[in-house]
Image: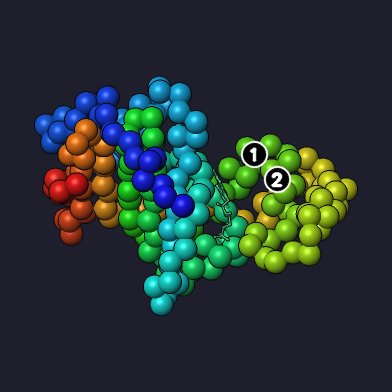
Amino acid sequence: MDTDKLRREYRAQSGHLLEENASSDPFEQFEQWFADAIAAKLDLPDAMTLATATPQGIPSARMVVLRGFDANGFCFYTDYESQKGKELAENPNAALVFYWRELDRQVRSTGIAEKMSAEESDAYFASRPVESQLAVQTERQSLVIAGREHLTEGFQRAEQTYSQDTISRPLHWGGYRLVPNLFEFWQGCPSRLHDRLCYTLLPDGAWEMKRLSP
Ligand SMILES: Cc1cc2nc3c(=O)[nH]c(=O)nc-3n(C[C@H](O)[C@H](O)[C@H](O)COP(=O)(O)O)c2cc1C
């Protein structure tokens, strides 16, 4: 299939990403762009690709949802025994990518993924809708299952077993925080003259900003 006809021009309708306008703190820059994505009413502004790898360097990537960020990093929740969970247990290096198409913007971040504390995971679990709480009791993510019935039966069993008061976070499910050591902000521009500002964490804790060729 020839996909060349899908080619499109990037518009930089929000303006160029210039060193003098960008924050020297990449977390603040992310916060600004994330606020822009929300203000633009984008669908799933919090959806991000998470890339992990085995210790041998075999990569895998999938979407997850951002469930909070601050100067400590980006939080997401998952099954600790899923493929990503097993990979992170052996190799905590991970990368995230956000793509906000309508704004012609991409953010990449690389860092080390740490498990969140049990208290943080408990608090988030307790805030989820009861259906979501039941769903994680039903099955371990990423296992091979016999068919869809297996899922629905498991969910019904969980509904019979737990009430809203007795349901608690299973230990195999919880949060990770990706602690970044690198950010890249990409603003698509006409004629492929895109802006790319890359922030690298220095040993003294300061961030160094550099422009990369598109
Ligand atoms: C938009 C979107 C958001 C998702 N959010 C999550 C999430 O926050 N946590 C999660 O475990 N899986 C999420 N998933 C499912 C994952 O992409 C993936 O299928 C699942 O986590 C199993 O991945 P693994 O086998 O590589 O560990 C999401 C999928 C999509 C399409």
Please give the count of numbered marks on the rendered protein. 2
Mark number displayed over residue 69: none
Residue 113 seen anywhere in this rendered image of the structure: no
Query: From the viewer's perspective, is residue 57 above or below residue 148?
Result: below
The image quarter in which residue 99 lies: top left
Query: From the viewer's perspective, is residue 12 above or below residue 25?
Result: above
Measuring 22% from the left and 34% from the top, which residue is drawn there? 189
The image quarter in which residue 128 lies: top right
The image position of residue 164, as x and y in percent, is 78, 40
The image position of residue 44, as x and y in percent, is 50, 35
**Mark 2, residues whose alpha carbon is within 10 Å: few (<14), some, or many (≥20)?**
many
Residue that label 2 marks: 133
The image quarter in which residue 94 lies: bottom left
The image position of residue 205, as x and y in percent, is 20, 53
Judge left or right: residue 155 versus residue 102. Answer: right
Measuring 39% from the left and 73% from the top, which residue is drawn there? 57
Query: From the viewer's perspective, is residue 91 above or below residue 29?
Result: below
Q: Earlier in the sequence, mark 1 or mark 2?
A: 1
> For numbered disc 1, what is the local secondary structure?
loop
Measuring 39% from the left and 35% from the top, which residue is drawn there? 101
**Marks 1 and 2: CB-CB under 8 Å?**
yes
* Kind of residue at badge 1: Arg
Measuring 68% from the left and 61% from the top, which residue is drawn there? 140
Q: CA separation, marks 1 and 2?
A: 6 Å
* Kind of residue at badge 2: Gln
Judge left or right: residue 8 versus residue 143. Answer: left
The image position of residue 182, as x and y in percent, is 26, 53
Mark number displayed over residue 128: 1
Specify the farthest residue to the left: 20
Q: Is mark 1 within 8 Å of ligand 1?
A: no
> For numbered disc 2, what is the local secondary structure?
helix
Relative depth, front residue between 98 and 67: 98
